[in-house]
Image (cartoon, helix red, strand yellow):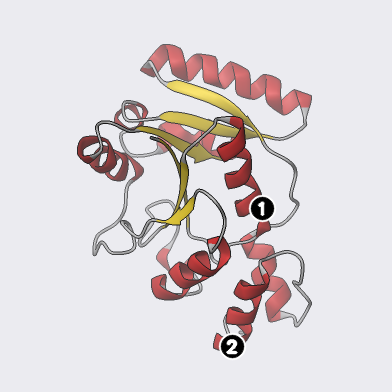
Amino acid sequence: MKIGIMGGTFDPIHNGHLMLGKTAYKQFHLDEVWFMPNGRPPHKEWASIKSDAAARTEMVKLAIAGIRGFRLEAYEVEKDTTSFSYETMEHFFSCRREDSFYFIIGADSLFSIETWVYPERLFATCTILAACRDDIDTKEEMLTQIQYLCKKYHAKIELLKAPLVPISSRELRRMIREGKSISGLIPQKVEEYIVKEGLYES
């Protein structure tokens, strides 16, 4: 199978995440896209995560329910230790040798990926799909970066032509905190769960 990996804190998951997953699914003819919430991500301060792993996992489950090819992968949230992308992907790579993995990242991550722990070990396990919006300057810069990384690490990297969805989890948390409507920006079931649990209100 061809499997896409969408990792993130998903605090909360929103329509931009879903659109990116759908785009990767169609553009690269993937069989599945795994949405994988982080447990203890190394790249963010622990205190910056505003809801616990159980709540973030439940929101992902609600968001992707009924979407063809989408599934929840709880590997990282079930770990007690910090999750590193290279470790996670080496785990999947070793136990599912018959499958091909596609690790989905944003443009910003493409330029910072060398600061990740053992990026060369991550590159060895999967094809990187780097999301590129309709901005020709950014695309040219990304192509240059891809060429550099492929030459240095023998990486496999493809551009993922992603539509622009101008929303972020941080912005959504601010809107909820200020009592503003987030309807249409996140799946309705996720919005209902946030209201029910009183998430992000303070």
Marking on residue 57: none
Q: Is residue 148 left or right of residue 131?
A: left
Q: Which residue is mark 1?
A: 16
Quarter location, residue 176: bottom right
Binning the other alpha carbons within 10 Å of mark 1 as few (below 14), some (14 to 19) or many (20 upward) gives some
What's the residue at 28%, 41% (across, down)?
92
What's the residue at 28%, 64% (across, down)?
78
Q: Amino acid at mark 1?
A: Gly
The earlier-in-sequence mark between 1 and 2 is 1
Residue 133: % across, % down: 72, 35
Residue 201: % across, % down: 63, 84
- The quarter of the image holding the N terminus is top left
Q: Is residue 151 left or right of residue 81?
A: right
Q: Is residue 118 above or below residue 8?
A: above
Q: As drawn, which residue projects farthest toward the top?
A: 151
Q: CA distance from mark 1 to mark 2?
A: 22 Å
Q: Nearer the viewer, residue 154 or 97?
A: 97
Quarter location, residue 47: bottom left
Q: Which residue is mark 2?
A: 196
Residue 177: % across, % down: 68, 80
Q: Secondary structure at mark 1?
A: helix
- Residue 3 seen from this side: yes
What's the residue at 25%, 61% (across, down)?
79
Q: Amino acid at mark 2?
A: Lys
Quarter location, residue 12: bottom right
